[in-house]
Amino acid sequence: MYIIAGLGNPSKKYSGTRHNMGFDAIDNIAERNDIEVKQKKFKAMCGKGMIQGEKVLLLKPETFMNLSGESIREAVDFYEVDPESHLIVIYDDISLDPGKLRIRAKGSAGGHNGMKSIISHLRTEKFKRIKIGVGEKPLGMDLADYVLGRFGRIERITVDKGIDDAARAVEVIIAEGIDKAMNLFN
């Protein structure tokens, strides 16, 4: 079983913000693969289904971004999933242009508090991740205000394409491996 976790903050207040790219990607994946993400478990909203012939658990932690690791750790432990081979985390990245993807098999948190939490709880940096670019914050703007802000109309179109690409990248990772996904989407 694969656990595919998208990072974000719960509640309508944060819907559509830069920091909720992971949630948006999970919603896209769920729609593409006819999976309902309605069960409350592991401090998250989740749903089980199939992608490319593999069982998956889609996970949207409801712990708020900075505590995402608590939720993901519970799911990993419950299903006895090896994070290195069967965990994919999707999240926002301010160092990438809006809508651009960066797929990696492992890596540091890069200053992202949600990733810091996951790495701390799993005690490893070795798990697959898909970063979706949200662009750099403007000079002088507070980082929290920027990532909790919303995209303009034109930028949203670009970001929505990136979210769709992230969903397709998950399918490629599961069917053909991470190297193929990196070659296609990085």
Image: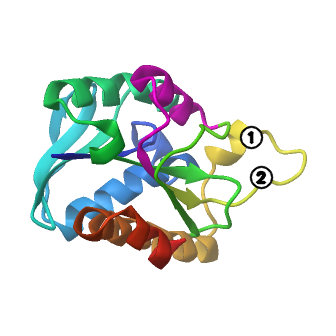
Pinpoint residue 126: horizontal percent, then vertical percent.
45, 39
List the single residue furthest toward the right.
Answer: 140
Pinpoint residue 133: horizontal percent, then vertical percent.
60, 61
Q: For residue 174, which quarter of the picture?
A: bottom left
**Residue 178 to residue 145: above or below:** below
Residue drawn 40% across the image and 56% down it: 24
- Which label number is shown at residue 154? none
Amino acid under disc 1: Leu
Residue drawn 41% across the image and 43% down it: 127
Residue identifier under label 2: 137
Residue 92 shown left or right of residue 44 in the figure: right
- What's the CA distance linking mark 1 and mark 2? 7 Å
Q: In this orientation, which residue lies closer to the viewer: 134 or 118?
A: 118
Q: Residues within 10 Å of mark 2 (few under 14, many from 20)?
A: some
Q: In this orientation, which residue lies closer to the viewer: 158 or 54?
A: 54
Mark 2 residue element: loop
Residue 116, magenta (yes or no)? yes
Residue drawn 50% across the image and 35% down it: 125
- Which label number is shown at residue 143? 1
Mark 1 residue element: helix
Any part of residue 4 in sight: no
Magenta stretch: give its range: 112-129
Q: In this orientation, which residue lies closer to the viewer: 53 or 5?
A: 53
> Are the residues flagged by discs 1 and 2 in contact, CB closer than 8 Å?
yes
Amino acid under disc 2: Lys
Residue 186, magenta (yes or no)? no
Any part of residue 133 in sight: yes
**Residue 33 to residue 145: above or below:** below
Residue 126 shown left or right of residue 44 in the figure: right
Residue 101 shown left or right of residue 95 in the figure: left
